Image (tube, rainbow, N blue to C red):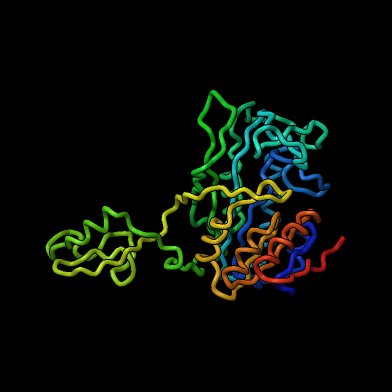
Amino acid sequence: MRLDTIINRDALCALRELPAESVHCCVTSPPYYALRDYGMDAQIGREDTPEQYIARLVEVFRELKRVLRPDGTFWLNIADSYAGSGKGIWKGATEKTDCKNNYRADTTAAIHGMPVVWDGIKAKDMIGIPWMLAFALRADGWYLRSDIIWNKTNGLPENVKDRPTKSYEHIFLLTKSGKYFYDNLAVAEPIALSTAIRYRYGRKENTKYADGIPGQMSRQQINNPCRYGKTEINPLRNKRDVWNINTVPYKGAHFAAFPPRLAETCILAGCPKQGIVLDPFMGSGTTGAVAKGLNRQYIGIELNEEYCRLAEERIKKVSGDKKIGEGCV
């Protein structure tokens, strides 16, 4: 198995050729349903029904589960789609509108011919893709450990007048076993200033929190309430499940890249140093670039050859000269 490489191939086919229990962590964001046409015959995201889309992803991630170590973690970034909205007909992104982050619809794209309503799903309904996928993966044997909300604090406006603007996506933490690697201290976050000030006054021995705060870390690690007369305060708390992370513009041709800070948080928490991080939908290479910067190894899989080149160039800036791995036609 070659490490620090990008395989230009269909995700399922490439995963089938990787050794069992060989990677420590997976961080990925598959193509969202009925949103864009990436111009590839075997692409995921333009199936006739949401159920077919979910079934394809479950098949891919079943093979991922075989490749993942028993103590491995799987971080899945996914967002919802609307039925019959007419907003998701994108291809190539070569012709920009006045808004630098939006692109004109391409009515010649294959996705334009997809159905817009399905049995039980009406036009303008949210489909519920994230939870459909999460529950399907759980039924397929994955442990569904956390639903993390990625709050896009600088999210783009939407041209809608009859609902709130979407400003978040889901990140599901899944594992193949009940016990797994998770470095909570690597991603611990600062306590609030008001909490630090309160702790400086200390807690008397006879209060209900004298022995710690239920449901939080031990007094020897983080969230250690000061005892009366003590002044040392550990300023960290356990990572919460709402992550406020700005979107980051990417100058390459791939226009659905997630921010490096998101990948960084997942890798720090879910992959040991020198461990192997896998992204079966590599895209612009965010996962690989961040993995190299954090002293981890990576394997990327990407169907689109152009995106492979983008990812290769991006990772070179972090790790030196790396070549695209041997892929199959």
Q: Nearer the viewer, residue 259 or 162?
A: 259
Q: Nearer the viewer, residue 201 or 23?
A: 201
Q: Quadrant of the N terminus?
A: bottom right
Q: Is residue 317 left or right of residue 235?
A: right
Residue 55 on image: x %, y %: 69, 48
When the figure is inspected, residue 135 is found, relative to residue 228, above or below; the finding is above
Residue 11 shows in the view: no
Q: Nearer the viewer, residue 229 or 144?
A: 229
Residue 70 shows in the view: yes
Residue 25 on image: x %, y %: 59, 66
Residue 85 on image: x %, y %: 66, 29
- Residue drawn 51% across the image and 69% down it: 181
When the figure is inspected, residue 79 is found, relative to residue 220, above or below; the finding is above
Residue 195 on image: x %, y %: 27, 55
When the figure is inspected, residue 178 is found, relative to residue 198, above or below; the finding is below
- Residue drawn 65% across the image and 64% down it: 288
Q: Quadrant of the C terminus?
A: bottom right
